[in-house]
Image (tube, rainbow, N blue to C red):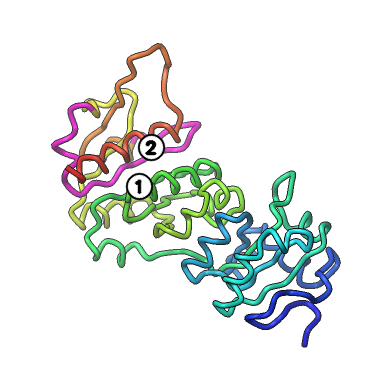
Amino acid sequence: MSSDSRPAGEFPTAQPLSERSSRVVSYAKLARASVRRERREFLAEGANAVTAALDTGRARQLLVRDSDAERFAEVISRAASDGVPVSTLTARAADKLTETSTAPGIFAICSLLDADLGTVLRARPALLAIAVEMREPGNAGTLIRCADAMGADAVVLLGDSVDPHNGKCVRASAGSVFHVPVIRERDITVGLDAVRAAGLTVLATAVDGELSLDAASGILTAPTAWLFGNEAHGLPDDVASSADYRVSIPIRGRAESLNLAAASAICLYASSAAHAH
């Protein structure tokens, strides 16, 4: 039996993996997008993400800081019962794997999450959240979390957008990256054409949009796809102008605008509420 892990159903008692372990060194390389693509796997950290990975059958390996094994005993037992190998880590090994200032103490090596746009569209989705050239991983993770909370059928990342398997994106999603299909399509035109062909009404968020969100309830009852741009530049002009409607969120106070997280939450909630009624 390897000293690095224990078989399914057995609490890990072997020597913890050190920061010099070949496996830890290999796992740490998953911080790079090129390595994730090559291996078709990524690293999720934190209890929310790891639990969601187990719930959805995406976890291939569970890693727990040795000093936290008792704290995460329930998660460890769950992984073992699911046939997911469990290994413990030294504190330094956990620090080597984390991208945060303080390691959360629990990690999972997971299979990639890429969904297929055609498959999602054939299922006749009622609500899509589409990010166009969204490069900030925290914003992408927050959008995925909002979409999950509001019952969206998928999140689509168009153009030169962030890798949703980026550690910061996974953490910001608080496990939602495992719950809602996430699709990547580098060709913006191809992606939007497919969405339109599937019969969805395309809505672009815009500060100067001609349609107020307050007056959009009739439109929101139909299958819709919301377009969100990146934090710095918003939606490209040609993408915004190609939407069926450019929608503005009324601001009744003195704030100049809303950030991406707030705007996406408001718009997706409006659609979710319209569908519910």
Residue at figure coordinates x 28%, y 46% from the top left: 225
Residue at figure coordinates x 33%, y 15% from the top left: 252
The N terminus lies in quadrant: bottom right
Front-lying residue, 238 or 36: 36
Q: Which residues are magenta?
A: 214-237
**Is residue 152 positioned above or below 109 on the image?**
above
Find residue 244 and report its horizontal and vertical position in percent.
21, 39
CA gap between label 1 and label 2 equals: 8 Å
Front-lying residue, 242 or 147: 147
Relative to 113, 240 lies left or right:
left
Residue at figure coordinates x 61%, y 53% from the top left: 167
Q: Residue furthest bottom?
A: 1
Label 2 Cα crowd, 10 Å radius (few <14 / some 14-19 / many 20+): many
**Along the polypeptide, which appears first: circle 1 or circle 2?**
1
Label 1–label 2 contact, CB within 8 A: yes
| Residue that carries the numbered disc 1 in the rendered image | 129
The answer to if 232 sits in the magenta stretch is yes
Find residue 41 and report its horizontal and vertical position in percent.
59, 68
What residue type is disc 1 on?
A: Ala
Relative to 87, 143 lies left or right:
left
| Residue that carries the numbered disc 2 in the rendered image | 264
Relative to 115, 49 lies left or right:
right
Front-lying residue, 77 or 88: 77
What residue type is disc 2 on?
A: Ser
**Mark identifier at residue 238:** none
| Element under disc 1 | strand
Label 1 Cα crowd, 10 Å radius (few <14 / some 14-19 / many 20+): many
Residue at figure coordinates x 78%, y 63% from the top left: 66
